[in-house]
Amino acid sequence: DLAGNYGNPMFADINDARYNYIYIKLLRKYALGNFKQLTKDITIDPAMLNYLNGRDNTGQAPNENYARELMELFTLGKGTLAGPGDYTTFTEDDVKEIARVLTGWIDVRNSLPIKTEFRAGRHDVRAKTLSHRFGNVTINNAGADEYKNLIDIIFQKEEVGTFIATKIYRWIVQTKIDESTYDNI
C-alpha cells in the first residue's frame, strides 16, 4: 500500500522503514533456508523485539508476548487443552519460563543501522525449568546465547516438524486437512 505496510500489521505498528527493511532482509535470507536459524535470528530481530514487546522483557518484569507466539504461532502450535494451563505441546508455566529466557534483549533505535543488543543487567540469570512437555529440562544462565539454547530445545520436539509442514501444506496445497492427510502425505 502507499504507506509501505504491504498488508503486514507489524509494519503499520512499527511505522519505521529501517525496521521493516531489516525484517524483510532477514525473511529473504532464510526464505528457502534453515528454519531453526531463522527462528533464532528473528527472535532478536529489531522489528520483532519492538512488535512483540521483547524490548520490554526484563528479568524484573518478564513479558510473555513473544514467548507465547514463539510456541503457539511459530513452532509448536497450541495443541488441544489437556488440563488447566496445559496444552499438548506446552504449558502456561512454559510461557512464563521462556519469557524469562528471552529477557535482556533490546532494539537500539538511535544507532545506524538499527541493531539489537543484549544487556546483561536486564536478563534473568536464574535457572529456568520447563514442564513435562519438554522433559522438565532446566535452562541455565547462558547470557546472550541462552535464547539459542531454548530454540534448540524447542526444535527437538517432533511437533515442530508436523506444525510447520501442516502450515506449508495448507498454504500451498489445500486448506482442508484431515486424518487421512496426516496418514498419507
Image (spheres, rainbow, N blue to C red):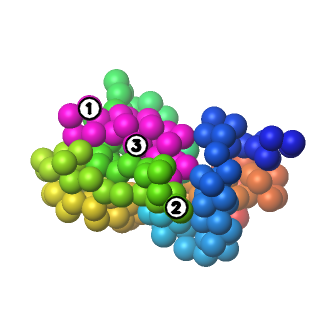
State which tag comes first along the sequence, 3 or 2.
3
- SS class, disc 2: loop
The answer to whether one can see residue 91 in this image is: no
Residues under numbered marks 1 and 3 in contact, where contact means CB atoms less than 8 Å apart: no
Q: What residue span does the magenta drawing correspond to? A: 46-71
State which tag comes first along the sequence, 2 or 1.
1
Residue linked to disc 2: 112
**Residue with the most extreme top position:** 84
Return the residue nearer the eye: 135 or 69. Answer: 69
Task: Tell me how far mark 1 sits from mark 3, CA to CA.
Answer: 11 Å
**Corner quadrant of residue 85:** top left
Depth check, mark 1 against mark 3: the one in front is 3
Q: Can residue 153 be found in the magenta stretch?
A: no
**Residue with the most extreme right position:** 2
Name the kind of residue labelled 3 in the image: Arg
Q: Position of residue 139 (x, y in %)?
A: 20, 56
Residue linked to disc 1: 61
Q: Is residue 3 above or below residue 179?
A: above
* Mark number, residue 55: 3
Residues under numbered marks 3 and 2 in contact, where contact means CB atoms less than 8 Å apart: no
Name the kind of residue labelled 1 in the image: Ala
Residue at 21% across, 53% down? 120
Name the kind of residue labelled 2 in the image: Leu
Depth check, mark 3 against mark 2: the one in front is 2
Residue at 31% across, 57% down? 118
Task: Tell me how far mark 3 sits from mark 2, CA to CA.
Answer: 18 Å
Return the residue nearer the eye: 76 or 48. Answer: 48
**Residue with the most extreme bottom position:** 33
- SS class, disc 1: loop
- SS class, disc 3: helix
Q: Position of residue 56 (x, y in %)?
A: 37, 37
Q: Position of residue 41 (x, y in %)?
A: 48, 63
